[in-house]
Image (cartoon, coloured by chain):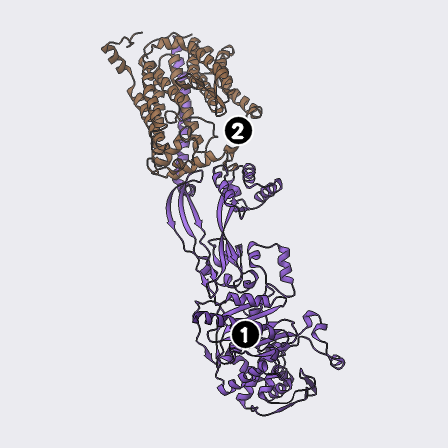
Chain colours: A brown, B purple
Amino acid sequence: MSSSGTRGSREGAFAFGQGLNWGLILTVFLLGLVGVGTLYSAAGGSFEPWAWRHGLRLIVGLFLMLAVAALDVRLLYNGAYLVFGGLLLLLLSVQLFGDVTMGAKRWLDLGIVTVQPSEFIRLGMILALARFYQSIHQDVVSHFQNLFVPALIILVPVALIINQPDLGTTIMLAVSGVGVLFLAGLNWRYFAAGAVGIVATVPLVWQRLLDYQKERVLVFLNPERDPLGAGYHIIQSKIGIGSGGLFGKGFSEGTQSRLNFLPEKHTDFAFTIYAEEMGFIGSVLLLVLFVLLLVQLAFIANQMRSQFARLVVGGIGFSLFVYIFINLAMVTGLAPVVGVPLPFISYGGTSMLTFLLSIGVVLSLERQVRVEMSRG
Amino acid sequence: MAGFEDDATTFTRRGLVLGVSQIALFSLLAGRLQYLQVARSDLYATLAEDNRVNVRLMAPPRGQIFDRNKVKLADNDQDFQVVLIPEQAGDLDATVAKLSQLLGFSDRQQKDLLNRARRGPKFRPLTVAENLSWETFSQVNLNLPFLSGVQPRVGDRRIYGFGDATAHSVGYVGIETKHDIEVHGNAPSDMVGRSGIERYFEAALRGEAGVRHVEVNVHGRTVRELAFDPGRPGADIELTLDISLQKFAHERMAGHSGSAIVMDTQTGDLLCMVSTPAFDPNMLSQGVDTKSWNEMVAHERKPLMNKVLRGQYSPGSTFKMLVGLAALETGVITPDETIECTGMYSFGGEDFHCWKDEGHGPMRFEDAIAQSCDTYYYEIARRLGIDNIEKMARRFNLGQPTGIEIGGEKAGIVPGRDWKRANYDAGWRTGETLITGIGQGFLLVTPLQLAVMTASLANGGFIVRPRLIRDTEPVPPQPIGVDAKHLALVNRAMYKAVNRPLGTAYDSSILINGNRMNGKTGTVQVRRISKDERESGVLSNKELDWHLRDHSLFVGYAPHKNPRYAISIVIEHGGGGAYVAAPIARDIMAELLRNEGRVREARAS
């Protein structure tokens, strides 16, 4: 605890402010603002019902992010398993008491807000994995006996979510976890073996999939299979994006969303509205903003001195990338519709909060980069 | 901390692998966006526009058809319909089930509808129900949000208030076919005229569809109107027909197969134009099944054929006026010269019979027409030669269409040397001249041509063009150039034919308000009478099959002093002209003159 600024004194606050990566915060804020504008447009040029809430969540989330940024890094480290365990319990309680909305048991009604623990668990999982790898020596990372703990950390929440059922979140969680293992330096052979295993179990998994999940994959492979049904999302989204052209139809002028041809336009398909109205140039600018975010995270991760910090920042960055890429690939027709929100843009409280808290963790780690931790 | 550097190196190396992969994947995304938004943006812009804009056609009301007194002959009735576009229905079973429930369909009807929706082209609107009550129709309208692919439609149904009586003149409409679209372009409604005025005035009657470009949302709800063109309703058409006379004539013709025409001798206005048997145009407009249609087509009395224009018959004795005029004009005979009729005329080793076996005795010009002596006409035809007969027939417009506004008219045949050469590759024989002289043989005319011919005899020698539509510019009557004195003789003879005891149509004379009718009967033999039959006694028409009986004809005009109306009656296989056609003409003309008298009285008082 060499340079913590949580005492509340003016110098302390100043020092805290100085230690923060304002560039990263600005990037995140800009992305959130793009989200507010897009949702304003999605509602046909109105702050109701999405844009103002999104904005409010952005502000509140930024403050929570700063609060997390103020946390002592050792607290994060020591509390990692606790946070993960608590979130697992929360996930389990969703199984027992959760709301069934849209056929999926995802939300837990806390009275004031409804939360999706399945989103939060990702951050908990990354922290837990990072803590585990901090606690073992690099030489034994690939040892067989050291596979069990990480496997449990990933598979237990995956198993809980898969039951909910929520294909998109489950995949995101698993892929994020595997990303951390990769960054931790697990032997290549495990990944190769895993890939072979997945391919081998595809037929088994296919049998277990629910009808709508099967349909989504089939329609992805051929959207024209059901142009007015399951393929409708993809086709209408491509029409929306494509019709934007080079310069777009102009803010709030997108006909695909205004006339409701685009379903779920405020959540998973928010990018379609943006691309329709802002055109290719606007889309590429947004892409650049996302790349900027990821590059910053990569640099931060590389500066970190402890394996814990490296893996947390790297894991968060990778997880963000997976969300961004899968969402954009989905709305442009490159991936099946799996229900993945676009970070900071799509409407959704838990998603926004999870990403902002994750950035808060990154800020905290970067601020306390000199705090040393022993390994092994 | 030996492992410290190692950890960082491993992490950096792995991070680099991920970073490079991410850059590759982001490039893929950028490429995809370039493809969608730049390379293919025109395609997607079009698709978005198709989503957004819905072009709605509004069928204009079809023009109405009236008679000369503004009585409605063809009207439109609003018909509430429901159509289903299968490809827009989404869950077809659910939509059909819901719709069937609203329409009160039986299980069987529901199954039929489902089958039809599955079988046909998915884009084509399928008529689910027609002639719905307003209550049912509004029920469907209220439930539209739950009935994807279902469209309510207010269709125009054509109503012909006088049914069969106007079948051939007004015609009827049918549902547009692919062929119609090729000919007329897309009809603004799906009705297309199939015959008569409906067919030949399709362009005027159909009007232009109104077009609404509306912006619609995903549910097909109109968000706002982008453009609106009200279109143009179809033009109304007023006919020259007098529907009360038309109806009377139609009823009077009941049971007969033939035509009845009353034409204004000055203007060519057709006051009545009847072809029997007819059909119910209301039924045909709704569409008939193939079996009924084929039966109508195959029927020996040809109900679908407008015999007024398309029936071609030998004129028989109604042609004698023209032969007589030619004879007077060329001077091969004088009005007072007598020709002895013995009932038979021998020429070139052949016997030519007069209809009166015992013969007429000495005949002069007027008597020969009034009593329709064939022997007299064999003789003057021989003296004239075919060329002179042909020339006179052509001057009276025979052998060519009259030019009535509705198409499909036949030209008839005026035979001559060239015609014989062209069609039979044989020379003309004088025997054929004799037969032509009594209006038989190769000579063929339509009932309408006979009406024009009769009008020309009555109006002082002018060809008029028959007119069915009052807006048609009347064509100035064309002088034929026959001597007025000769015409007067012919008219005098036609007076005698009807109004003198020895006249063939004496039984059909009328006297209404001092007006009489002049005319000429015609009996056309359609079979060859063999020598044996002649010796054993010619079979009467009643003894023969219908199709072997004589055609019965009558042409005439009234009033006898200042002729206004020409009449032409042809009854297929009706028997003697005097017995069937003449009484029909008498009754129709009497009805017309009586009505006229009534109108005059009403005006006077």
Chain letter of disc 2? A
Q: Amino acid at mark 1?
A: Ile
Where residue B567 is drawn, which disc sits there?
Answer: 1
**Quarter residue B279 falls in:** bottom right
**CA distance for labels 2 and 1:** 80 Å
Q: Quadrant of the N terminus of chain B?
A: top left
In the image, which is nearer the foreground, mark 2 or mark 1?
A: 1
Where residue B186 is drawn, which disc sits there?
Answer: none
Counting from the top left corner in percent of width and height, residue B8 is at: 38, 15
Where residue A212 is drawn, which disc sits there?
Answer: 2
Camera-side residue of B293 and A86: B293
Give neighbour class at mark 1: few <14, some 14-19, many 20+ (Cα, 10 Å). many
Camera-side residue of A116 and A330: A116
Counting from the top left corner in percent of width and height, residue B501 is at: 61, 83
**Quarter residue B248 falls in:** bottom right
Q: Amino acid at mark 2?
A: Tyr
Q: Residue at x 35, y 36 (%)?
A: A277
Q: Residue at x 53, y 23 (%)?
A: A198
**Quarter residue B415 falls in:** bottom right
Q: Residue at x 48, y 30 (%)?
A: A336
